[in-house]
Image (cartoon, helix red, strand yellow):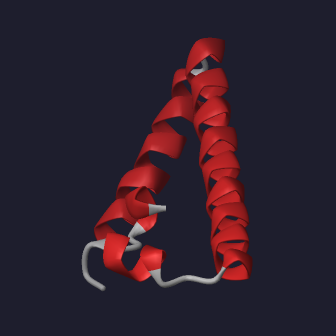
Amino acid sequence: MIEHGHRLPDILDYTLAQVRGFAAATAREDAARDARLLSLIAIGARGDSRHLDQTLDRLQNHAHLGSHR
């Protein structure tokens, strides 16, 4: 949970229900990230350079938009 932004002093004060809820949420977030990564690996492995370039452009645009928040 610390990896997802929770501070240890806060975690120590969470109820068991909160720990379970936050742990489930982080597991879902990790699974979604892993699915995106697998998709990107598959796109790269297929060798379609046009599709790879489009995906890279989209990700870079998204990264730049996220940095201005």
Q: Residue at x 69, y 41 (%)?
A: 35
Identify whether 10 is placed above or below 52: below
Indicate the position of residue 66 as horizontal and vertical percent values: 35, 73
Q: Residue at x 40, y 62 (%)?
A: 2
Q: Is residue 36 visible?
A: yes
To which quarter of the image does residue 24 belong? bottom right
As drawn, the residue found furthest toward the left would be: 68
Q: Nearer the viewer, residue 38 or 13?
A: 13
Indicate the position of residue 61 as horizontal and vertical percent values: 38, 62
Indicate the position of residue 20 as horizontal and vertical percent values: 72, 69
Identify whether 38 is placed above or below 60: above
Q: Residue at x 40, y 82 (%)?
A: 10
20 vs 58, left or right, is: right
Q: Nearer the viewer, residue 43 or 38?
A: 38
The quadrant of the image that shows the C terminus is: bottom left
To which quarter of the image does residue 26 belong? bottom right
To which quarter of the image does residue 36 belong? top right
How many discs appear? Answer: 0
Q: Is residue 66 visible?
A: no
63 vs 41, left or right, is: left
Indicate the position of residue 67 as horizontal and vertical percent values: 26, 73
Q: Nearer the viewer, residue 47 or 11?
A: 11
